Amino acid sequence: MDCEMKIFIGAIALFLGLAAQLTPATAENGTTLKLCSTTWGKLGGENLPGKGYVSDLAMRVFRHAGYKVETKIMPWPRCVELVKQQQIDLVASGWRGDNFAPYFDYLNVIVKDTVNFITLEGSPLQSGEMKNFYGKKVGLVREAGGLEAIFADQEKIEVVKVGKLEKLPAMLAGQRFDAIVSDPVSLNEAIKSFAQPFTYKIKALDPPLRVNLNSPLISKQHPNKDKIIADFDRSYRVLVAEGMYDELEKIHDLKVQRPD
């Protein structure tokens, strides 16, 4: 092999080596990331496409970045605890807030939603301001990403906690509560999944109790945290520009509030 050919081949090898270092989907990223989520309307569920909207979104982004991804659906407290212990790499999506901040770092905001008081149509309660519920009983999902924290200093409101979102509408209709506290989109999607039609009309009261920013969560102690966050950010921006949200809305038949 002549000298010029050796130089040419060497230049190609150098170029390919540099390209591999600059591309997020490198062989190094070919390892498997484990994600978890929970049953939450069309946002999460064992039998949903991609196991639900937020898991589908997170997996698409990580796969674009070159990772292999697995998602498990499990009770919310267990999902959070296993990610905290690094037995699972990430929570597919959780609300940013003080309850998570000490233990987790956040990836990009992927969805916005609100938490509202929700009543039956015709209820005398017309405003979502906290003071209007003094002396009332409200229901919410136990350990649902910080809902309980909203009422931590509200001794004038009786809070009843249940294990599953799907239980709340029937309990509201049965007058077990004056109102329930939930993300209206997830609640409506849960109602649509009922085997028997839910014939009562409900309404979400304004102003909302809180506007939530939803992000994947990763333990602050995860050894590959910085790289995972950077890879996700890079691929997320590419996929958003390519119309990922429009595609997800068609697949999941769900319109979400997109981040600004």
Image (cartoon, rainbow, N blue to C red):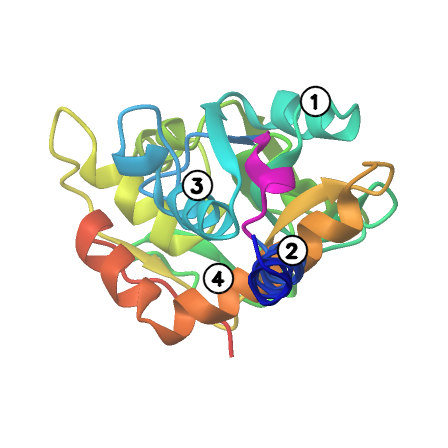
Q: Is residue 11 visible?
A: yes
Q: Do the residues bearing badges 4 and 3 touch, measured as CB atoms within 8 Å?
A: no
Residue at 55 percent across and 62 percent down: it is: 5
Mark 1 or mark 2, earlier in chain: 2
Mark 3 element type = helix
Instruction: Give whichever of discs 4 and 1 has the lower sequence position.
Output: 1
**Tag 4 near tag 1, CB within 8 Å:** no
- Disc 2 residue type? Gly
Circle 2: element type = helix
10 Å crowding of disc 1: few (<14), some (14-19), many (20+)? some
User: Disc 4 marks which amino acid?
Assistant: Asp
Residue 155 visible in image:
no
> Looking at the image, is mark 1 or mark 2 nearer the viewer?
2
Looking at the rendering, the stretch of residues picked out in magenta corresponds to: 25-32
Which residue lies under the disc numbered 4?
113
| Amino acid found under the numbered disc labelled 3 | Ser
* Secondary structure category for the residue under label 1: helix
Q: Label 4 crowding class (10 Å Cα cut-off): few <14, some 14-19, many 20+?
A: many
Callout 3 crowding tier (Cα within 10 Å): few <14, some 14–19, many ≥20: many
Q: State how far apart marks 2 and 3 are (Cα).
A: 33 Å
195 versus 244 height, above or below: above
Q: Is residue 222 left or right of residue 47?
A: right
Mark pair 4, 1: CA separation: 25 Å
**Element type at marker 4?**
strand
**Badge number at residue 82:** 1
The residue indicated by pointer 2 is 17
Left or right of residue 141, residue 159 in this image: right
Q: Residue 55 carries which label?
A: 3
Residue at the (48%, 27%) spot, across then down: 70
